[in-house]
Image: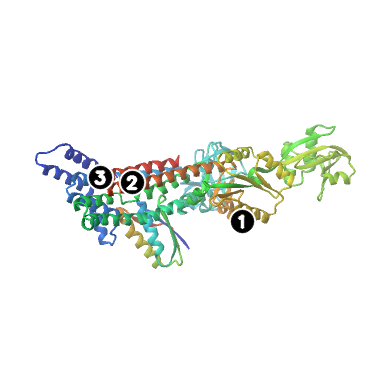
């Protein structure tokens, strides 16, 4: 299934690429794509368990801190 | 953003003072430099330290901190401040440009309706469009956006569809007409029966497409991401080697000099400018296209369009109107109007497109009481009694069967012979009309270096070839069944060059397999057709095929900008690295080159939006 996240405050394109790479490596994540300009992340996950979502959020938070303004908000 | 601007200005003033005034005690200069540095740089150093504890060592803050602190250590005070100062200027500019570009796309896409006025229990309630249900009536006043798709049940008006189609000419609508969300009601009060939920409405679908288009990445974007991934570590490793090997292993000069060069390497080690300018360019291109009524569903398609080589068209509805129209009336011994009148009366009870075109051409009210009877003769035509006269309308077969001495006609299209009281009265030629815009479309495609324009049709050979020769198409394949179209496209796919792309243009309804098969599937007249929006990679909201050229032009322009940025940025960075390694480049040049490249690449990218 596909999930759509809003990455509020995503200001660094390089970080976006790093977040994308890390999220792709999470267990249970099939694919991830970040649109830096639209500040959105599209994730394909195998199962809709909270564990995977938690991991995604944690990864984004860790990587998005590059400018200290990263803030992840779930959209759908 | 304001805060950092003030920091930059204060720091810059201090920096200038320290540079310009040689105080007697140069400790004052040094202190001024350090203060200037701390004002702009403390935040960066702090973040670098914090990130180290989070396990992120090689981020840009860390590299900038090392470069500048290192410069202080070897006594290059002005350089240290300048690097941090201009790095911050670059960052500020980057944020500003990205923010501005996001906002301009957002305003471009400002078609989302905020409210719907719903008639409930004889009262008008103000609701959010999401809350309105199918079947309810909504009221739209002049000047307001139509919030949901539906049919007009009361009132008439002009509607402005430009936000959806890029078409500036307003459309006239009245009772029974379908209207789409996102259009603006110009002058009349409309009551609309809602036919789709907000989530399914045209405006929601378009917004979803445009907002999500940039998630399908182009090859250029993937290249840059990969480049960035290796660039920073490689530059850092070379910097470390540069600081150690020449002075200690090769005994080439002193350590301080080589350390300076290594620190300069770190200044240009951040690939951010490049990484940011590429998606910015694609985003602008997609936004600019949607302003013209062209929805491109991904950066990858925008990129592919620039190498379009073969454009394949479906005929009916794409190059032609897809509507039958009376092209010619030849009367024999009676007036043309009379001939048309009898034909329209005779065909009145039929719903065939041909009958509809006859009624449209006649254009007057039909008095049903004048039709005594009308009977359809399968495969031949119609026999009817109108105003006491026996009317025969049909093809050669009918005329021969009824022994009418008629004149056979060789024109291309559907020919209806008419006989009144068993006497030949003339013929009417009905044909699908070529769109006015198709001529322009083919001409501009050729100007855009498209190698081959091809038409596929299920229509008869004569009809198809006539259209193709009028439009000056390179190739035509006629009398094709749906799977024949798939086969032809497969053959054409083999003909193109390795990097060339095949574009298929259709109405998006019957040609889903071909759309999927081609490199880029374009659906025409996507406005209001969910199937087309779903199946295609690019959707043209109006029914003008010339928009394909517009899309290719936008694509070429975007790709030019993207390539310029990639080549320019990489060249400058590599050049600075080489000059630095040989001791020609200084830290000053490095920071100006780095920030300069950033700013220029971003400004260049912003052109894509126009």
Q: Can residue B521 be seen in this view?
A: no
Q: Is residue B90 visible?
A: yes
Looking at the image, which is closer to me, B281 or A42? Answer: B281
Mark 1 or 2 closer to N-term?
Answer: 1
Mark sitting on residue B586: 3
Looking at the image, which is closer to me, A14 or B540? Answer: A14
Mark sitting on residue B513: 1
Label 3 neighbourhood size at 10 Å, few (<14), some (14-19), many (20+)? some
Mark 3 or 2 closer to N-term?
Answer: 2
Question: Residue B347's quadrant in the figure?
Answer: top right
Across and down, in percent, residue B12 comes to 22, 40
Query: In this rendering, do the residues under marks 3 and 1 share a single chain?
Result: yes
Protein chain holding label 2:
B
Across and down, in percent, residue B339 comes to 80, 36
Label 1 neighbourhood size at 10 Å, few (<14), some (14-19), many (20+)? some
Residues at discs 3 and 2 in contact (Cβ within 8 Å):
no
């Amino acid at each position: 299934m596909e999930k759509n996240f809003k990455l509020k405050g995503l200001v660094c394109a390089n970080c976006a690429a790093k977040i994308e790479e890390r999220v792709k490596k999470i267990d249970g994540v099939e694919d991830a794509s970040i649109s830096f300009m639209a500040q959105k992340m599209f994730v394909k996950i195998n199962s809709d368990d909270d564990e995977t979502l938690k991991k995604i959020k944690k990864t984004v938070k860790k990587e998005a801190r590059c400018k200290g303004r990263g803030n992840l908000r779930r959209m759908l | 953003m304001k805060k950092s601007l003030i920091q930059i200005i204060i720091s810059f003033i201090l920096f200038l003072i320290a540079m310009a005034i040689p105080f007697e005690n140069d400790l004052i200069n040094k202190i001024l430099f350090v203060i200037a540095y701390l004002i702009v740089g403390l935040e960066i150093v702090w973040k670098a330290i914090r990130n180290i504890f989070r396990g992120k060592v090689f981020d840009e803050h860390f590299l900038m901190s090392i470069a500048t602190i290192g410069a202080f250590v070897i006594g290059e005070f002005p350089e240290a401040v300048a690097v941090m100062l201009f790095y911050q200027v670059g960052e500020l500019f980057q944020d500003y440009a990205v923010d501005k570009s996001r906002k301009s796309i957002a305003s471009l896409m400002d078609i989302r309706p905020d409210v719907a006025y719903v008639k409930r229990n004889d009262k008008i309630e103000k609701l959010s469009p999401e809350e309105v249900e199918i079947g309810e009536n909504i009221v739209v006043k002049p000047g307001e956006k139509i919030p949901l798709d539906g049919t007009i049940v009361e009132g008439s008006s002009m509607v402005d569809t430009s936000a959806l189609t890029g078409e500036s000419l307003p459309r006239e609508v009245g009772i029974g007409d379908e209207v789409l969300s996102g259009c603006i009601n110009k002058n009349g009060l409309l009551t609309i029966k809602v036919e789709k939920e907000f989530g399914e409405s045209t405006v929601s679908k378009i917004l979803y497409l445009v907002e999500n288009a940039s998630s399908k990445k182009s090859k250029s974007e993937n290249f840059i991401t990969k480049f960035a991934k290796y660039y920073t570590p490689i530059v850092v490793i070379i910097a470390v080697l540069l600081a150690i090997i020449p002075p200690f292993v090769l005994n080439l000069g002193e350590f301080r000099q080589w350390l300076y060069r290594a620190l300069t390497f770190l200044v240009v080690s951040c690939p951010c400018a490049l990484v940011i300018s590429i998606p910015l360019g694609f985003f602008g291109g997609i936004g600019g296209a949607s302003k013209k009524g062209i929805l491109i569903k991904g950066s990858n398609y925008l990129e592919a369009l620039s190498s379009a080589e073969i454009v394949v068209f479906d005929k009916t509805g794409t190059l032609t109107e897809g509507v039958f129209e009376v092209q010619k009336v030849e009367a024999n011994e009676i007036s043309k109007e009379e001939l048309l009148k009898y034909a329209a009366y005779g065909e009145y009870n039929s719903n065939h497109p041909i009958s509809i075109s006859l009624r449209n051409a006649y254009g007057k009210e039909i008095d049903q009481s004048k039709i005594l009877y009308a009977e359809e003769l399968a495969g031949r035509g119609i026999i009817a009694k109108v105003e006491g006269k026996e009317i025969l309308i049909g093809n050669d077969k009918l005329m021969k069967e009824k022994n009418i001495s008629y004149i056979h006609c060789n024109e291309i299209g559907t020919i209806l012979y008419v006989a009144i009281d068993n006497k030949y009265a003339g013929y009417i030629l009905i044909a699908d009309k070529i769109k006015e815009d198709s001529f322009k479309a083919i001409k501009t495609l050729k100007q855009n270096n498209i190698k081959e324009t091809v038409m596929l049709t299920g229509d008869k050979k004569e009809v198809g070839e006539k259209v193709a020769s009028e439009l000056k198409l390179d190739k035509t394949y006629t009398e094709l069944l749906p799977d024949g179209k798939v086969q032809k496209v497969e053959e054409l796919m083999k003909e193109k060059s390795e990097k060339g792309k095949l574009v298929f243009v259709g109405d998006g309804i019957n040609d889903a397999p071909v759309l999927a098969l081609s490199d880029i599937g374009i659906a025409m007249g996507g406005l209001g057709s969910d199937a087309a929006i779903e199946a295609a990679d690019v959707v043209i909201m109006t029914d003008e095929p010339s928009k394909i050229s517009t899309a290719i032009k936008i694509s070429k322009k975007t790709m030019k900008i993207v390539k310029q940025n990639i080549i320019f940025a990489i060249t400058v960075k590599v050049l600075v690295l080489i000059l630095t390694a040989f001791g020609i480049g200084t830290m000053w040049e490095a920071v100006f080159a780095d920030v300069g490249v950033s700013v220029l690449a971003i400004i260049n990218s912003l052109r894509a939006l126009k």
